[in-house]
Amino acid sequence: MERQKTTVYLNLCTLLGLAGMACFIWYGVQNQIFVSAESLKHFLNQFGLFAPALFLVIQMIQVVLPILPGAVGCLGGVLIFGPVWGFVYNYIGISLGSILAFLLSKRYGRPFVRGIIGEKNYEKYIGWLEKGKAFDKAFAVAIFLPVAPDDLLCYMAGLTPMSLKKFATIIFLGKPGSIFLYSLGLTGIMEVLKQIF
């Protein structure tokens, strides 16, 4: 009986959290917060000392609900907080969001994952699960690469027998390199574009 109550409370908290994320994304889209790094910077500057915490939440959301382009968040982190703290906040937010996506996938299974990532993406990556233990290695390699669809793969990993400990280890070890390369690459492109235009 006590276990059923705990399950109901956890499900309710999850639904409220997802609803809150959806409302924030709706607000962000309506107010064009996520259209560019500059818009994101302008929005976050209003929160002063709380800006880093809000940015972490935004980075978590962009992993769990892959609507917000990840490039905007990564570039925004570097432009708003500088290369060091921008990298740190990107790393923490994306890593926590990845773990949350994995846990949601574990808890709610295939119908939930299909609904979040879409039928097309689901059908495209569901074949990875047939690789068995080879999936773990393929997943680890993909997390190291900055061009892999990490968010989708985190959801797919939740459908496998992979443990949370193993998943978190792959994320914490694999994400720094890809986030660094991604942020560095985007920052370099922005600098080149500024010089040209």
Image (cartoon, rainbow, N blue to C red):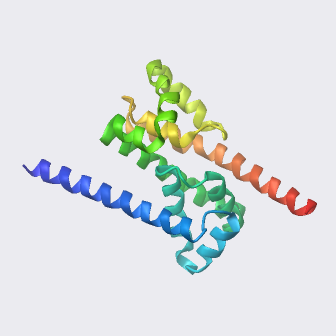
Left-right relation of 2 to 111: left
Left-right relation of 85 to 56: right
* Number of marks: 0
The image position of residue 104, as x and y in percent, is 36, 45
User: Where 109 falls versus 50 (above or below)?
Assistant: above
User: Where 8 falls versus 149 (above or below)?
Assistant: below
The image position of residue 185, as x and y in percent, is 77, 49
Closer to us: 152 or 32:
32
Left-right relation of 46 to 114: right
Outermost residue on the left side: it is 1
The image position of residue 112, as x and y in percent, is 36, 41
Q: Residue at x 44, y 39 (%)?
A: 155
Task: Tell me the quadrant of the picture where the C terminus can be found.
Answer: bottom right
Query: Which quadrant of the structure image shows residue 55?
Result: bottom right
Closer to us: 58 or 32:
32
Query: Which quadrant of the structure image shows residue 187?
Result: bottom right
Q: Residue at x 36, y 29 (%)?
A: 161
The image position of residue 120, as x and y in percent, is 51, 34
Closer to us: 63 or 165:
63
Q: Residue at x 40, y 42 (%)?
A: 115
Q: Residue at x 92, y 59 (%)?
A: 196
